[in-house]
Image (cartoon, rainbow, N blue to C red):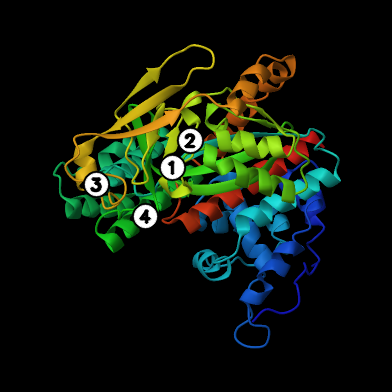
Amino acid sequence: MLVQQQSIQFSEHSSLYDLIIPKNNILRKINDLVDFSFIYDELLNKYCTNNGRMAESPIRMFKYLLLKTIYTVSDVDVVERSRYDMSFKYFLDMNPEDDVINSSSLTKFRKLRLKDTDLLNLLINKTVAIAIEKGIIRSKSIIVDATHTLSRSNPFSAIEVLRERSKLLRKTVYLFDDQFKESMPKKNTDNDLEKELAYCKELEKRIENEPSISSITSVKEKLNLLKETVEDTQENLILSKDTDAKTGHKSADSSFFGYKTHLAMTEERIITAAVVTSGEKGDGPKLPKLLEISQENGIDVETIIGDAAYAGKENLKIASEQNIKVVARLNPSIAQGFRKDEDKFDYNKDADRFVCPAGHLAIRKARQGTKDVGGNQVDTYYFDVEKCKSCPLKNGCYKDGSKTKTYSVTIKSELHQDQIAFQETEYYKEKAKHRYKIEAKNSELKNVHGYDRALSYGINNMQMQGAMAIFTVNLKRILKLM
């Protein structure tokens, strides 16, 4: 049961907040900047208003998840820190003497309350509205790019993941007590999952039995990470494959298993739109959606800045119809000709190859035709027919008995000619200098807020993780610019 929106009930100890938490504390600044009542309004229909136990405030639960993202900690540790960290208590609208929730409540909140909620667009819309209201966004350009996130179900075996977690825990312990090596259990050297699990449990027990070590915050955090991995491995026997994740290509020789987040961002580095897909999806086809969401969020777009993946014929056409300039280096291989949408393959700019709907990368390409002005050239991409023979999507794509499978694209078009001329202008060259900004934003998401790897399985959880990470970096950027 959820009663009318909750607010902090001041106690005789509430004045401690003004004494302890400085005005420039980031959590105080976020609380002052954002009216979180929009979370209550969004989730109200997920609660019963007249039956059942009293529910924890959805705003407080959301803030717990936000703290997890800001400080990159586990459910257990964010709750534990909120027990003694006064800035956390203040941010959570708690009295200093209030008790904390059970960490398992966060899992239930994610699964029961945030399920089927378009949290990604909701949070981006909120931060963009704040940025516009504060007069932060002045440019009329969006910079577009995609960043990849590895699936939680990674290419390593369960044993390898357990060994990496236990190694991290041991290294942290040795930083504080190098002599503790003598108390460690003997490592498992066999390729046996049950023996590795037994070793990890014994390692946990040894460290927990030594309060002088286990009470250290950094040790406790690594210990909790190992425990979560052990529990997950026991539940699944092996680290199960993430059914929504797919293999994508960072280059012709480099691949990853996971997801892509396609981003649009202003020159002021405020993210205005995001679309999460599986890893094999191309970057260029997501531009129309990124543009649409950015415009719906109140951004006046006159220029789109991106790399060669976004200079496809369809994107140039859509931009031209809205008098929007595309600052993206033209790659003629992106021209898709007159194929139907269902027959089009995605172009991977990093590998300089096309990817078929089944996710297979072309193995080579060849260019045909004359280079003369007005002449037509064609790029032909060749695929591995052995994969085509057993592909579940081969109907209408590969003819049984064929010795080759190719995909050809015409290079020359009027739109491309106009784009070639535009690339030589000073306006293009000046705007192109801003593209590096989104690379820095991708780095911040990954290296500071843990967006390099998925925290849970499935694309819905990936979208939720993206929502929290983008909300965080946008708020930090707004505070910095203010």
Which of 130 and 90 lies nearest the eye of the viewer?
A: 130
The residue indicated by pointer 3 is 159
Quadrant where the N terminus sits is: bottom right
Q: Residue at x 31, y 53 (%)?
A: 241
What x and y, as percent, mark residue 160? 26, 42
Q: Is residue 450 visible?
A: no
What x and y, as percent, mark residue 93? 73, 62
What x and y, as percent, mark residue 214? 42, 49
Task: Give the amino acid at mark 2.
Answer: Gln
Q: Is residue 161 visible?
A: yes
Q: Residue at x 61, y 47 (%)?
A: 289
Q: Nearer the viewer, mark 1 or mark 4?
A: 1
Mark 2 Cα shell of 10 Å, populated few (<14), some (14-19), many (≥20): many
**Disc number placed over residue 90 in the picture, else none:** none
Quarter location, residue 63: bottom right
Q: Nearer the viewer, mark 3 or mark 2?
A: 2
Task: Give the amino acid at mark 1.
Answer: Lys
Q: CA distance from mark 1 to mark 3?
A: 40 Å
Mark 4 Cα shell of 10 Å, populated few (<14), some (14-19), many (≥20): some
* Residue contact between numbered discs 1 and 2, judged by CB atoms under 8 Å: yes
Mark 1 Cα shell of 10 Å, populated few (<14), some (14-19), many (≥20): some
Q: CA distance from mark 1 to mark 2?
A: 7 Å
Task: Say what secondary structure mark 2 lies in.
Answer: loop
Sequence-wise first label, 2 or 4? 4
Sequence-wise first label, 1 or 3? 3
Q: Nearer the viewer, mark 2 or mark 4?
A: 2
The residue indicated by pointer 4 is 227
Left or right of 164: which side holds 38?
right
Q: CA distance from mark 3 to mark 2?
A: 45 Å
Q: CA distance from mark 2 to mark 4?
A: 50 Å
